[in-house]
């Protein structure tokens, strides 16, 4: 640059933009789209999205939304990472889950995973998994000084831990170099089973295991603070965090009362969280979890070096679908990416067919390769806290942390995690949250691809060998696809019994341009309930619709057209459909001023964006007497 042309930042050539200017642009778009005539902040608010836990996501974040200083990676409050180097040296721990009950089958899948990119093994042992006596066979050929082993043994955790420690010793490797987690989680077991008869003894046993690990195997953690039971019961992100804090505090009390120092007690805990396909919420949740636990550890007197939370993220079972399970690959990819970006120390990507039974070799390969691509090709672990500094992510992290802390305080105020579980306080809170979310799912405000949106009725079912039944008796296990799965099951039963699925006739009125959008909408909606759509001649009218309906084999019908065409033809066509034997006539669109006229002509109900799809579909199947 010359003296006459001094170097200036590129942005200096453009005028500064302010929030008011942006809001004016939003006003214009909303006005043209007919959404609202709101102006200023109200226009911006019209684009906001409400999440669970009272969190409201705004459409624009600026430096004004910044939060307090976050510190540095590896230092309190550990928002940015639990270690100074994050996962940049060797990547995160790729941890695969195994649920075989046969030790030989378990061993084959464990070795296949370890030979192809997995770095640690998460093994179900005892009830619902490999017998404790079969643990040695299941780990045959595994180099225990290289691959960490994490146990999930439920009520058998003490016996399983003793056997694993024996195997460490028998392997000849120094016990102090062993790594993994013995998986003791008495409060998680209480949440799963509702049985607290042996809780005190289990806590004491876990404390003895922790003391032994602290003295002889510092790389092995004795306890898992598993938040998955609360997520899988329908809990929100803040509720998952709050219950994990309360559980962790309960374990710290037990461990320190048993003689462990606070630093050693903190180092005996590994926290487990769900990673979902909501990438920003997952990233914020893991960052908030480290911040919250750092505060707990600080108050308890732990040193900064012992205050970093060890995290294991697992892709959510709640989001996994049984229909069109191939879409689960997309969900778990986003969830795995989010866990890595969020700074998890270990990540488990569940196979896409995990909801159907025991995953096959192909599904396990896809699961582990998902992480290999993220690590080795996308180099996702090479940047510490890649979402850090985003005004949105920082704001979301802060709001989530505050909501979780408030829930944690409620639990502590009720007497702690065990008391809150016994009283039903936690179960009631999670049930309320799931009820609200179920409403969103039913109204398709939270769409599920392949299930409530874009279903594929001709998709061949995927069959797998049944998996061991999970332990139960306590908190329920929910899935996002539950309501639609029940509807599809009714359709399947009809197909088996009669050789055909229930059908709906789509009566398209007027020119193609006026009915195409609503035909597509109606088809998508009814197929989500397993109701096959039959398109008649396009268009039909009052004179031709009866013959087309009779030829379709359908028992119900849905009118599809523009509002203008409805005003001209809907009443006559609805009356003709009823005369032709239609058990119910739907209209695609919201009820308008002519609702009474249409009702008198035979229109029974309306389907539109935001309607209760589950109620509409269930009612339609009832009318057709589909079992």
Image (spheres, rainbow, N blue to C red):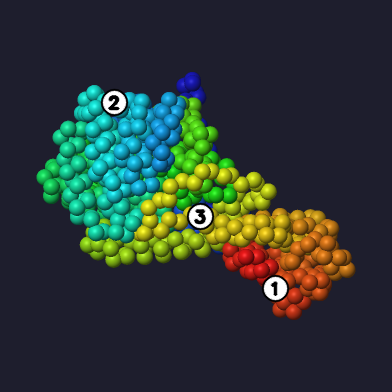
- In the image, residue 48 lies at what x, y percent? 50, 56
Residue ID at (46%, 33%) = 368
Most distant residue in the top direction: 2
- The C terminus: image quadrant: bottom right
Residue drawn at point x = 43 percent, y = 47 percent: 468
CB under 8 Å between callouts 2 and 3? no
- Distance of mark 2 from mark 3, alpha carbons? 40 Å
Of the residues under marks 2 and 3, which one precedes in the sequence? Answer: 2
Disc 2 on helix, strand or loop? loop
Does residue 85 appear in the picture of this structure?
yes
Q: Which of marks 1 and 3 is nearer the N terminus?
A: 3
Q: Is residue 214 left or right of residue 121?
A: left
The image shows residue 166, relative to residue 395, as above or below, that is above
Vertical order, 265 against 511 (above or below)? above
The residue that appears at 13% across and 43% down in the rendered structure is: 260
Circle 1: element type: loop
Image coordinates of residue 288 in percent, x first then y, are 34, 47
| Residue at mark 3 | 480
In this rendering, would 613 be left or right of 405?
right
Q: In this view, does 135 lie above or below 300?
A: above
The numbered mark at residue 604 is: 1
Determine the image quadrant of residue 573.
bottom right
Pointer 2 residue: 145
Q: Distance between the residues labelled 2 and 1?
A: 69 Å
Residue 70 position by quadrant: top left
- Of pointers 2 and 1, the one earlier in the residue sequence: 2
């Amino acid at each position: 640059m010359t003296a006459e042309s001094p170097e200036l930042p590129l942005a200096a050539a453009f005028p500064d933009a302010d929030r008011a200017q942006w809001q004016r642009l939003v006003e214009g778009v909303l006005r043209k789209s007919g959404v609202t005539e709101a102006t200023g902040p109200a226009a911006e608010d019209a684009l906001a999205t409400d999440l669970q836990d009272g969190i409201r996501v705004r459409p624009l974040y600026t430096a004004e939304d910044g939060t307090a200083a976050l510190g540095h990676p590896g230092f309190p409050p550990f928002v940015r990472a639990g270690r100074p180097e994050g996962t940049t040296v060797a990547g995160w721990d790729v941890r695969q889950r195994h649920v075989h009950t046969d030790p030989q089958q378990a061993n084959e899948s464990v070795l296949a995973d370890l030979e192809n990119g997995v770095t640690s093994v998460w093994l179900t042992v005892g009830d619902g998994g490999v017998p404790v006596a079969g643990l040695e066979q299941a780990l045959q050929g595994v180099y225990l000084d290289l691959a960490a082993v994490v146990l999930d043994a439920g009520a058998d955790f003490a016996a399983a831990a003793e056997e694993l420690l024996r195997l460490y010793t028998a392997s000849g490797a120094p016990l102090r170099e062993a790594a993994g987690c013995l998986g003791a989680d008495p409060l998680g077991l209480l949440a799963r089973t509702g049985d607290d008869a042996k809780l005190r003894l289990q806590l004491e046993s876990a404390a003895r295991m922790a003391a032994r690990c602290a003295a002889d195997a510092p790389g092995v953690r004795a306890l898992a603070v598993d938040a998955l039971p609360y997520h899988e019961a329908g809990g929100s992100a803040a509720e998952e965090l709050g219950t994990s804090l309360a559980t962790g505090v309960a374990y710290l009390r037990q461990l320190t009362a048993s003689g462990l120092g606070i630093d050693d007690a903190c180092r005996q805990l590994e926290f487990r969280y769900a990673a979902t396909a909501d990438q920003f919420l997952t990233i914020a949740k893991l960052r908030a979890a480290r911040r919250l636990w750092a505060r707990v550890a600080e108050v308890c007197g732990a040193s900064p070096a012992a205050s970093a939370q060890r995290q294991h993220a697992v892709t959510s079972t709640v989001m996994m679908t049984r229909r069109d399970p191939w879409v689960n690959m997309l969900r778990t990819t986003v969830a795995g990416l989010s866990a890595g970006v969020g700074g998890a120390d270990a990540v488990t990507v569940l196979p896409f067919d995990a909801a159907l039974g025991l995953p096959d070799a192909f599904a396990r390969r896809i699961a582990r390769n998902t992480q290999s691509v993220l690590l080795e090709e996308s180099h996702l672990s090479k940047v510490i806290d890649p979402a850090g500094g985003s005004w949105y992510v920082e704001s979301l992290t802060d709001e989530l942390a505050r909501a979780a802390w408030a829930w944690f305080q409620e639990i502590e105020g009720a007497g702690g995690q065990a008391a809150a579980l016994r009283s039903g306080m936690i179960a009631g809170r999670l049930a309320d949250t799931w009820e609200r979310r179920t409403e969103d799912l039913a109204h398709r405000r939270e769409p599920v691809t392949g299930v409530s949106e874009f279903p594929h009725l001709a998709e061949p079912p995927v069959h797998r060998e049944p998996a061991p039944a999970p332990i139960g008796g306590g908190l329920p296990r929910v899935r996002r696809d539950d309501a639609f799965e029940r509807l599809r099951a009714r359709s399947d039963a009809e197909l088996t019994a009669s050789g055909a699925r229930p059908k709906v006739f789509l009566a398209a009125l007027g020119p193609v341009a006026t009915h195409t959008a609503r035909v597509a909408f109606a088809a998508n909606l009814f197929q989500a309930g397993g109701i096959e759509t039959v398109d008649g001649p396009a268009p039909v009218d009052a004179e031709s619709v009866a013959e087309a309906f009779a030829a379709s084999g359908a028992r119900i019908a849905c009118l599809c057209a523009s509002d203008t065409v409805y005003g001209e033809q809907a009443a006559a066509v609805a009356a003709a459909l009823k005369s032709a034997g239609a058990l119910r006539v739907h209209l695609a669109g919201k009820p308008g001023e002519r609702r009474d006229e249409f009702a008198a002509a035979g229109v029974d109900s309306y389907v539109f964006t935001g309607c209760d799809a589950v109620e509409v579909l269930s009612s339609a199947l009832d009318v057709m007497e589909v079992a």
